[in-house]
Image (spheres, coloured by chain):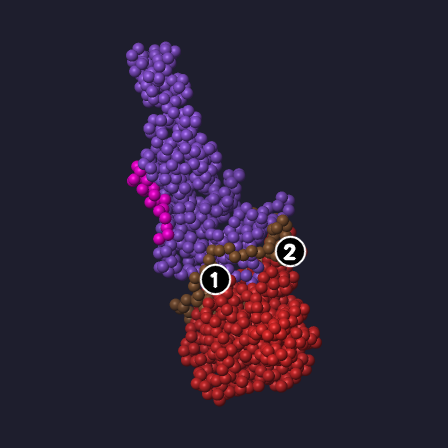
Chain colours: A purple, B red, C brown
Amino acid sequence: MNYETVVGLEIHSELSTVTKMYCGCATSFGSEPNIHCCPVCLAMPGALPVLNKTAVEFAIKAGLAMNCAITRSGKQDRKNYFYPDLPKAYQISQLDTPLCVGGYIDITVGDEVKRIRINRIHIEEDAGKLLHEAGGGTLVDFNRGGTPLIEIVTEPDIRSSEEARLFLESVKAILEYIEVSDCKMEQGSLRCDVNVSVRPAGQTEFGTRTEMKNVNSFRSAVRAIDFESKRQIEELEYGGTIVQETRKWNDDKGESYPMRGKEEAQDYRYFPDPDLVQIVVDDEMLERIKSSLPELPDARKARYVGDYGLTRYDAEQITNSRCLADFFEKAVSGGVSPKAVGNWIIGDISKILNEKSMEAGDIPFLPEQLAKLVTLIEEGVISNTAGKKVLDELFENPRDPELIVKEKGLVQISDEGALKAVVVQIIDANPQSVADYKAGKEKAVTFLVGQTMRATKGQGNPQMLNKLIKEELDSR
Amino acid sequence: MNYYDLTAHEIHDLLVGKEATSEEITKSVITRIDSVDDKVEAYLARTSEAAIEAAKRVDAKITRGERIGALEGVPMAFKDNLCTNGVKTTCSSRMLETFVPFYDAFVVKKVNEGGSPVLGKLNMDEFAMGSSTENSYFQKTRNPYDLQKVPGGSSGGSAAAVSAGSAVFTLGSDTGGSIRQPASFCGVVGMKPTYGLVSRFGCIAFASSLDQIGPLTKDVTDCANVLNTIVGHDPADSTSLNVSKVDYTKALVNDVKGLKIGVATDYLQDGVNDEVKAAVLAALDVFRSLGATVGEYTMKAAKYALPAYYIISGAEASSNLARFDGIRYGHRTESFDNLKELYENSRSEGFGDEVKRRIMVGTYALSSGYYDAYYKKAQKVRTVICNDFKEQFEKYDFIVTPTTMATAFTFGEKTGSPLEMYLNDLCTVSVNIAGLPGISIPCGFDGGGMPIGLQIIGRTLGEEMVLRAAYTFEQNTQFHKHRAIIGEKEGRSV
Amino acid sequence: MKLTVDDVKYVANLARLKFGAEEEGRFVSDMEDIIGFADMLGEVDTEGVDPTFHAINLQNVLREDVVTNLYDREALLQNAPGKMNGCFEVPKVVE
Ligand SMILES: [Mg+2]
Ligand SMILES: [Zn+2]
């Protein structure tokens, strides 16, 4: 039987505020444990929370960027449960008045645009960190405790792990564009819970879903969804049933398993936090935040397709990173071909970034230098192959590409007389190729071009060489 | 004349007139504690040396000819749920037996800035849950008017200390009557301000939407001066009101002519002690004789305030007290093999029965399937009670009730049944539910010489009206001048 | 409202409290009394009445996003019954 996978995501993103949600402690990582703590975020007796204004504004900004309606009068609620990383034994979250409701993000799947609806975005605080001591007990570090989060909850509109990945990329891009989160997956600033169910193709009602926790990267999300949908399909194929449960994703093993303690029915006893007051979003505040929104990835994508003639796919590749897109725009602003710049960015530059595990923001050279590189190729000064060498050099020791070309002797030979001499010499040395050519094997030309390129140390103008070789062969 | 019998404003006059030094006065109160506290047992911790040092600083200031504030040099003490930097703060619980805060409560900071020597920390019902201070893990505080009787609660230590002359004034907290009821039992003045007027930062929370800190004093003038010191906006408490500063001593006007008094007759019918009723009716006559008019009304939701209170406060407490888990501070059990046992044993050993009962009831009221029927219903009844008050305050300037239906009771008399103990808060809880200001002032004595309290309730931020009414009553009666004689059953003297 | 030992056990588990058998019985009857007392709330007509969560209505009490706290870790940890390497210590957490 054919099955359809149905996925819903709950994405937690840390907001890049300077201080925590309810106290003036700095939000920062990698420091000594329990340094960025105070009576409030350690839940000392008598301590009280005061909400961070920027966190509220950031959450609203995210909601607007994701096409949500903003709740004009909301509250914060306590979610009660005991865990050592939760000092108050309740998390301050939002139950029935999330700051943002009913939005969507459009993703491009193949050639089609697909809308993924967002149910809600609410604010809540992060928990501390448990460090497991080998052999001993567990240590608790509350530096992260109380960091502002937004939780983005989708409708079950996602139908594959690929769609989930595209959606997550879009979320990350939007948050980056509006500068409310730095979205560093490896530091846990974007995490998600993944709800998966399967159903026979064509069936309208949903199957029983499971929820997977501990999914900490886009790659894990893809793997976790694939694993879980396969597991569920197999279960159903063998006549089993799916149990609604919370599972934990183990990324090392590439599998999920039921969380311990599921016998403990979850009864969070949510109620409005009496230490906190209403959040009222008035027109003035809403307008102010709206007007602070930059151009969003979708709008940029459309512009790149319309103004620069990029394909939708290419445009999305570039606009998914604000840094990359900014770099692209600066590079093309001087008038070089956007298509060519785009190809360099999506191709070699992205590849090198990947290999060096660098972010777009870490590109060491200037957009103008990339533009120069493209110009040098377009003007025939250097070959494409030489261009790659120039790019490698730009990553190693960024400087004017023209200088690199000179220093490395990469200038293309376009002197017809000089090239003609090399061509004659190579053809003389390869009679078999001449015979092949005469027998109709076009491939011989390619071989001879390669040989002449080698003879010119890669500096021969390939188009010119091609032309000269054909002329010479035809003349024999 | 004993210094320890004086009010804060009398002491202030002596200091300013250089008739006594703060050191002499502070030492007089310390000596008083030394001689009576083994009987009254109001103090959990004493900070005599620091108090004397503070007193000396004030004296130096006076010697230099500098002006001093109204409470400067006047020795006081705090209820033990108010965090004091470097001084143990236990909430009278085994849970916090060794807890030493590294921060001050907002009010503690204010009092310190005001220059009052701090004598120590006062006994209370564990986590402020109770009406007799019998729920303290550490000791039983006795009523200075009769050592066989309870001082009331939960601020029993704060009321008894003022009543016994063991502190000139104290601070307590009031969630359902915890300042006013013990004030009434111990014959002193106790006020719960409008919710949000005094910052709760550093007050170990019982029920966040009801808790409010307030003064216990020997008279209404002192009450106004203490209010002046502790009221103020605190950016660290989201529920702290940001209102313009008022000088409450300006409200001390001996005049109620033309004012309209509402009397909630619900508290003068079934169950009220005859002597209490007579004292309240006599007090109303005093007001009438001074030109006020008295109107009677019945509070529609009067009998529902108590059950609503016990659900709301229990629910909030169940969550507020969840942080006491034996991890970052507080009692940690010695017998545990895993995390769950650490939680369960630490909490079960650290909390007393009444605290556990409230946590259980509150957890139940919030749990799946019961939220609507109990917690949410109680909050709707709260709306009804608030509206009821609003309606009355359209007609009346202030409302009068007895503070309690009876005078102080004997130890153990009500410990058998939690519900019977809860009835102590009958007249006071609705004031917390609606966030209103309320004061209890002495208005008589029963046949056994035990004090009777009169409760005056004002509208939101109506502290000035409450103080004016209380002050006028006080200026025209003598009850506030009585002092307890410790160890004498008939402990009344003028 | 009739309460059972199982009800008390369920609530006690949520609240991380533990009772002996004798205590459990006492809590059943105490809670039954208190909850039974609260059942009286059902008599109040609250049709169309909104709940009041705060007696005083405040809104938008917000803090500027500026670092204001600087505490000594020693002070933060001074009351901890179990600590190690600048952290609070708990028994091994099995997930
Ligand atoms: Mg959440
Ligand atoms: Zn903090």
Percent position of residue B53, x then y? 65, 69
The answer to whether residue A419 of the structure is visible from this angle is yes
Q: Is residue C48 left or right of residue B143?
A: left
Percent position of residue B433, x then y? 48, 71
Vertical position of residue B121 compared to residue B282: above or below: above
Residue A276: mark in rendering: 1
Q: Is residue B27 left or right of residue B444?
A: right
Percent position of residue B298, x then y? 45, 79
Q: Quick one: quadrant of the N terminus of chain A?
A: top left
The three-letter code of the residue at mark 1 reads: Leu
Residue ID for mark 2: C81
Q: Quick one: quadrant of the C terminus of chain A?
A: top left
Q: Is residue A293 magenta?
A: yes
The reply to whether the C-beta atoms of the residues labelled 1 and 2 are less than 8 Å apart is: no
Q: Which residues are magenta?
A: A291-312
- Dot 1 falls on a residue whose secondary structure is loop
Percent position of residue B392, x then y? 43, 78
Vertical position of residue B213 compared to residue A109: above or below: below
